[in-house]
Amino acid sequence: MLTRVLEDQHGGGFNPLDTGHLGNFVWTLVIFLISLPVIWKFVMGPISKALLERDARAQTAIDAAQRAAADAERAKADVEAKLAEARAEAQKIVAESRTRAETVAKSVEAASRAEAGKLLEQAKREIQVEREKALSAIRGEVVELSLAAATAVLGRNVGSEDDRRIVGDTLTKMKSGARQGPR
């Protein structure tokens, strides 16, 4: 309420820049100049110090963020390099595996062919042996039939060992001539 009374007496409020009241202006200036060192020491000093500390903390945080970003970039590059190296190693392993598989396949194929060749040769030998046995049996039958026919034709007993040998030799000569073919 007191402020209202003062406002009414002076025609409004207190205006320190009003040059009509030079005394008020001078006292305001004197009080400001006297309180300025106190304000500077107790208000502006701590505020300036707090602002400087805040700036230092912000700069520290910015530096740490930049270091972290650089570390992250290096880590990313390392990971990409290791990934590329792993890919190359995987491709190398796959290529080696393919080569080994082809080698094994060729080896198995060669072994199979060799085994098949052995079996074929064995079968041929067995066939030859059986053929020789069959031919020998047929020759024996032919000799017996020839001797029986000769006995019937000659009317005497033909069948001694000597007769058998002569017929066998004759058949062998005939067989040798048949293998050589006509001349």
Image: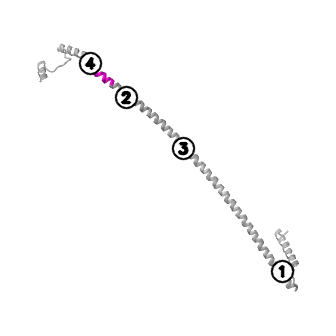
In the rendered image, residue 81, in percent from the top left (x then y), is placed at 52, 39
Foreground tag (1 vs 3): 3
* Quadrant in the picture for residue 32: top left
Foreground tag (4 vs 3): 4
Residue at 73% from the left image edge and 66% from the top image edge: 124
Apparent side of residue 113 relative to residue 17 in the rendered image (left or right): right
Q: Can residue 177 be found in the magenta stretch?
A: no
Proximity of marks 1 and 2: CB atoms separated by less than 8 Å:
no
> Whole-Å distance between the Cαs marked 1 and 4?
156 Å
Amino acid, disc 2: Arg
> Whole-Å distance between the Cαs marked 3 and 2?
42 Å
Q: Secondary structure at mark 1?
A: helix
Amino acid, disc 4: Val
Task: Give the residues in magenta.
Answer: 38-49
In the rendered image, residue 24, in percent from the top left (x then y), is placed at 18, 15
Name the disc covering residue 57, or none: 2
> Whole-Å distance between the Cαs marked 1 and 3?
87 Å
Apparent side of residue 79 relative to residue 10 in the rendered image (left or right): right
Q: Which residue is mark 1?
A: 146
Q: Which residue is mark 4?
A: 38
Foreground tag (1 vs 2): 2
Foreground tag (1 vs 4): 4
Amino acid, disc 3: Ala
Residue at 71% from the left image edge and 64% from the top image edge: 120
Amino acid, disc 1: Ser
The quarter of the image holding the N terminus is top left
> Whole-Å distance between the Cαs marked 4 and 3?
70 Å
Disc on the earlier residue, 1 or 4: 4
Crowd around label 4: few <14 · some 14–19 · many ≥20 (10 Å)? few
> Whole-Å distance between the Cαs marked 2 and 4?
28 Å
